[in-house]
Image (cartoon, rainbow, N blue to C red):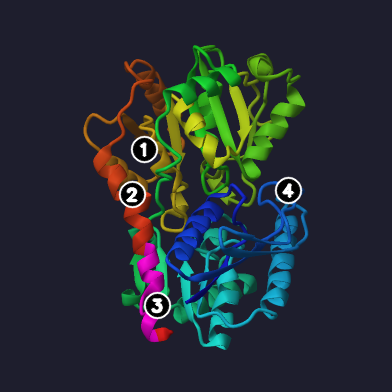
């Protein structure tokens, strides 16, 4: 069976969707299938970095296409990059031979539309793996106006992808409900969450110490947000808490990852701070501000940050880029408290896949977001002894109190992962289920 996989990120990019798709491709190869991946030459969060145009890696044929690299500094830049990628992708796909199965993810938004049409032309089976749900996400974020011509057009494209799909893979029950609301037949939707990276991510005491020493965190209580920094994961409440605790030299807020909001935090910090290395971060300052950025009256929730709204200086913020998968256990283990955030409007539109690796390293968790959600249900179901807390957006007092409570808990550097939950969301539990769905009827189709 021949598989064509479509997504803007793939090995060696460190973006989460690329990592998950890479693991799917490797497993398909191991099961004797032929796999071709069409992806981007540009690293998702560092468009100045270019990968090889094509290569064979572990038996997978990887075709990387060019696009503009304006970056994410403005809506038009991002739109231009997405549009140029789609055009280049269509041109390259036109030269490919027929494949039996087409699998499309959601980066860039609605690449699934291209995959659905290609599968229809080839008379191939189409599988839609919904990592985030657009254009609904863009509308909720204020990037698109509901009812506008663009929103209606993109919604029509999304519905076409859903209709053409042999299977639609949703990441949680809330996303399934959003997909059902589009008129999708329930029988074709399967809920399979992303998995933890079992072989790479486990609590590592030695890695914890390496990371903390490398970044001057010895003796600090480290509050970490790790992953994509996007308006769909509003950080306003976390940063307000950092401001409240700015005079407490024992607490450091560490932002690890990338995305538009991470760059705003880092650029502000670089502008305000004379950074002389990892031991010097605590001597600098970073004035941060909150802007609505198209979120209307929801600015306190959307939490888009720039250079100067908070009229104070934060000396307790450390920004680090995405960590390679083979070093992810070190950074996640280094935190004394992991923060997971979900915007009020985005339940069922995006999925917080970072939670599974956090549970694998048994880190205490502070959830900031709405109830009910996949996160609230997952955390509420943990064993009573697992350290976790939750707060709503804007509850800064509650977040500060929670941080102080976590600081008083003993044994934060000696942890035991919740085996029952980790087993449910493990790679070896979920990846075979996904492969089974993609292989459904292979003999009959072939």
Which of disc 4 and disc 2 is earlier in sequence?
4
The residues bearing labels 3 and 2 have C-alpha atoms spaced at a distance of 29 Å
The residues bearing labels 1 and 4 have C-alpha atoms spaced at a distance of 33 Å
Instruction: State whether residue 100 appears in this view.
Output: yes
The residues bearing labels 3 and 4 have C-alpha atoms spaced at a distance of 35 Å
Would residue 267 be found to the left or right of residue 209 on screen? right
Question: x, y percentage for residue 336?
Answer: 43, 24
Q: Give me the residue at 33% from left, 26% from top.
A: 415
**Which residue is disc 3 drawn over?**
183
SS at mark 1?
helix
**Which residue is disc 4 drawn over?**
73
Specify few, some or many for label 2: CA neighbours under 10 Å numbering under 14, 14-19, or 20 or more. Answer: many
Q: Which residues are magenta?
A: 434-444
The reply to whether the C-beta atoms of the residues labelled 2 and 1 are less than 8 Å apart is yes
Which of disc 2 and disc 3 is earlier in sequence?
3
Q: Give me the residue at 35% from left, 78% from top.
A: 185
Instruction: State whether residue 252 appears in this view.
Output: no
Of marks 1 and 4, the one in the foreground: 1
């Amino acid at each position: 069976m021949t598989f064509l996989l479509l997504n803007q990120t793939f090995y060696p990019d460190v973006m989460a969707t690329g990592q998950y798709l890479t693991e799917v491709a490797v497993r398909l190869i191991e099961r004797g299938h032929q796999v071709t991946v069409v992806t981007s030459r540009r690293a998702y969060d560092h468009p100045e970095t270019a990968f090889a145009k094509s290569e064979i890696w572990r038996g997978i044929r990887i075709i990387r296409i060019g696009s503009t690299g304006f970056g994410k500094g403005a809506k038009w830049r991002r739109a231009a990059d997405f549009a140029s990628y789609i055009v280049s992708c269509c041109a390259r796909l036109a030269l490919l031979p027929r494949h039996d199965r087409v699998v499309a993810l959601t980066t860039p938004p609605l690449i699934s539309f291209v995959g659905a049409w290609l599968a229809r032309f080839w008379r191939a089976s189409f599988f839609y793996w919904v990592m985030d749900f657009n254009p609904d996400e863009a509308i909720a974020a204020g990037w698109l106006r509901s009812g506008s011509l663009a929103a209606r057009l993109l919604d029509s494209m999304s519905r076409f992808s859903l209709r053409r799909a042999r299977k639609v893979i949703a990441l949680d029950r809330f996303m399934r409900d959003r997909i059902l609301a589009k008129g999708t037949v329930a029988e074709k939707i399967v809920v399979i969450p992303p998995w933890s990276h079992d072989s790479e991510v486990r609590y590592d005491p030695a890695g914890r110490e390496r990371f903390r020493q490398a970044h001057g965190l010895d003796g600090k209580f480290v509050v970490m947000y790790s992953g994509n920094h996007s308006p769909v994961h509003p950080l306003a409440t976390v940063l307000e808490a950092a401001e409240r605790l700015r005079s407490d030299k024992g607490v450091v807020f560490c932002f690890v990852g990338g995305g538009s909001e991470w760059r705003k935090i880092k650029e502000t910090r670089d502008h305000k701070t004379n950074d002389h290395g990892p031991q010097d971060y605590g001597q600098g300052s970073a004035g941060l501000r909150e802007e609505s950025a198209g979120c209307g009256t929801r600015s306190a929730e959307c939490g888009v940050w720039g250079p100067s709204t908070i009229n104070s200086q934060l000396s307790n913020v450390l920004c680090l880029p995405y960590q390679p998968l083979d070093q992810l256990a070190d950074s996640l283990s280094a935190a004394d408290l992991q923060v997971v955030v979900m915007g009020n409007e985005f339940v069922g539109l995006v999925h917080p896949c970072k939670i599974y690796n956090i549970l694998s390293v048994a880190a205490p968790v502070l959830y900031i977001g709405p109830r009910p959600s996949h996160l609230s249900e997952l955390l509420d179901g943990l064993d009573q002894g697992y350290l976790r807390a939750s707060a709503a957006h804007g509850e800064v007092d509650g977040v500060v109190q929670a941080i102080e409570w976590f600081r008083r808990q003993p044994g934060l550097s000696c942890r035991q992962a919740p085996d029952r939950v980790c087993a449910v969301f493990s790679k070896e539990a979920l990846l075979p289920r996904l492969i089974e769905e993609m292989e459904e009827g292979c003999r009959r189709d072939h």
